[in-house]
Amino acid sequence: MTKVLAISGSLRSDSYNSKLLRNAAELFGDEVEVEILGGLKDVPPYDEDDDHDGAPEAVAALRAAFAGADAVFISTPEYNSSVPGHLKNALDWVSRPLATNPLRNKPVAVVGASTGAFGAVWAQAELRKVLAAIGARVVDGEVAVGHSPTRFDEDGTLMDEDLREQLGEVVDALVSAVAERHQLIRTAA
Amino acid sequence: MSTTQTQVPAGTWNLDAVHSAVGFEVDYLAGTFRGQFRDVQVELDTADSGARIQGSAEVASVDVKDENLAAHLQSPDFFDAERFPTLRFVAEDVDLDSESVVVRGEITIKGVTKPVEVTGTLSEPMADAYGNERLGLKLSARVDRTDFGVDWNTPLPTGDQALANDVTIVAELQLVKAA
């Protein structure tokens, strides 16, 4: 079964990005197991001095979660026109050492929600750049949920049909990228 | 450039990989950045009617002075080694009758195949110390990397891009005639 690691870039308990992530999780279908990453708040600031002879426990768990996933799905808010620091920090830990990091060639999708009008488009663009630099295979497609307090009902369901369709397209693109990668790996074996 | 008549004996010529180099040159910031591919295959078949040359390079063997840069070059941002592990070149009807060589062939980078003109020089075949016939072939071709989907760049504060689109592919080959 395909395993997708889902990450909300917002730590807030009633986060719109976490809601967006749960909406995406429901679109993956029965053949995909979606694991929502916890513990992002426990990851310490990146420090190379702490990355010798065993990383901190939270980092080891983080790296294991990435290594065990076939794909990654990230929903990010936008802080000061960019990626939240704790999300970037987590990716910095995962990316070391760069040449062998578990994100290399791994399909990754990025979507985002913000309370403002633009749906975290700048944070999404920066996050895609960061992920590509790490070596991930960032799939095409963008979902920008602006004015997010108005976009979800009481159960957390994304109400806008166009946005739901876009979210479905990104989910499909990620699933296709995983299938293609599995085929490549089987062919090479 | 003056040209002289060169006679290349008919047969198959195999690459002396140790004494050959295949790589690329591209302007980056204030200078020219160079890289090579360590795992390269080249075969030249010559006949009275003309010659055929084919070559390939493994992306995973890209050799630069920083392992993190090598990893980035293999990633989807650049050559995407997992999906497209091999770069290829092939040319039919190669004219090797003069010191100056112009080869029209096809090059495949990142799964995209396009015609390319390759120019260079051919050395007079010589006998080496081990009883082999050997010749030297220096070739270069300029391609626009974005034609092949190798699109990575990063903007400078001035608004210019850090990495040029034009890339020169360089091959300095020593070929040994098969017995």
Image (spheres, coloured by chain):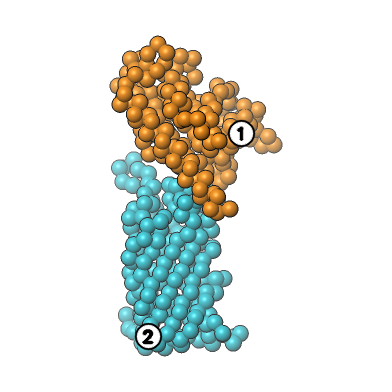
Look at discs 1 and 2 and give the one toward the viewer: 2
User: Pointer 1: what residue?
Assistant: A64
Quarter assignment of residue B105:
bottom left
Q: Which chain does cyan denote in the image?
A: B
Residue B162, image x and y in percent? 37, 48
The numbered dot on residue B49 is 2
Residue at x-position 62% and y-position 29%: A61
Q: Residues within 10 Å of mark 1 (few under 14, many from 20)?
A: few
- Work out whether residue A62 or residue A181 is closer to the camera in this orientation and state it: A181
Residue A189, image x and y in percent? 58, 53
Q: Is residue A107 left or right of residue B28?
A: right
Residue B107, image x and y in percent? 38, 64
Residue at x-position 35% and y-position 26%: A164
Label 1, label 2: how far apart the Cα atoms are: 60 Å
Q: Residues within 10 Å of mark 2 (few under 14, many from 20)?
A: few
Residue B109, image x and y in percent? 41, 58
The numbered dot on residue B175 is none
Residue at x-position 56% and y-position 46%: A99
A61 up-or-down from B105: above or below: above
Residue at x-position 40% and y-position 61%: B108
Q: Is residue A119 left or right of residue B45?
A: left
B172 up-or-down from A139: above or below: below
Q: Dot 2 lies on which element?
A: loop
B31 up-or-down from A143: above or below: below
Q: Dot 1 lies on which element?
A: helix
